Amino acid sequence: MTSRTKAAVLSVVLFVAVTALATLATAQAPMPKPVLVLKQLVPLNTGGKQFTRYVYFVANAGAYPNTLFAAAPKLPPCGLNANASRTWVDFFDKGGKRLNGFCALGNNQDLDGIWFALESNVIPPSYVHIEMTDRQTKTKVKSNDADTTP
């Protein structure tokens, strides 16, 4: 192999290595599984009806960078909110029925106080979970099953 050929091969190898390292450096780590915990039950009256609000927090909220909750105007809106957050959080019961959702959380601290509500005379599901959907990367993670009773 001539020195010119060796130099060309070395250049290609270096280019591939630098490109691979740059890709690794910019690749986002996968979202960890949320650890959902019941915080409190809050009775409330709205529209003449009695409800119970089931309030939760994500124990490992600090593991999620705040960039996941930044406004994402280039992604589809949430209803009339054209600046919905990049990551949406939805509550589900064990059967897959959606109970509530949040599309405008501003940072990872907003994962403390997420909730769903049921009329007070409705028996809650035994367990619920959340799904966090990063709409930019089309990544979804599901939490543990969390109790609905303290």
Image (cartoon, rainbow, N blue to C red):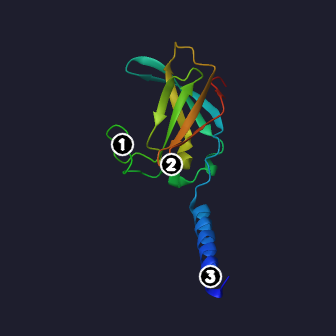
Camera-side residue: 74 or 109?
74
**Horizontal and vertical percent position of residue 136:** 47, 49
Element assignment for label 2: loop
Farthest bottom residue in view: 3
Q: Which residue is mark 3?
A: 5
Element assignment for label 1: loop
Give residue 77's mark. Answer: 1
Give residue 19's mark. Answer: none
Camera-side residue: 45 or 107?
107
Image check: 76 left or right of 150? left
Foreground: disc 2 or disc 1: 2
Under mark 1, the amino acid is Pro
Element assignment for label 3: helix
Label 3 crowd (10 A; few <14 / some 14-19 / many >=20): few
Under mark 2, the amino acid is Thr
**Horizontal and vertical percent position of residue 40:** 60, 30
Give residue 137's mark. Answer: 2
Foreground: disc 3 or disc 1: 3
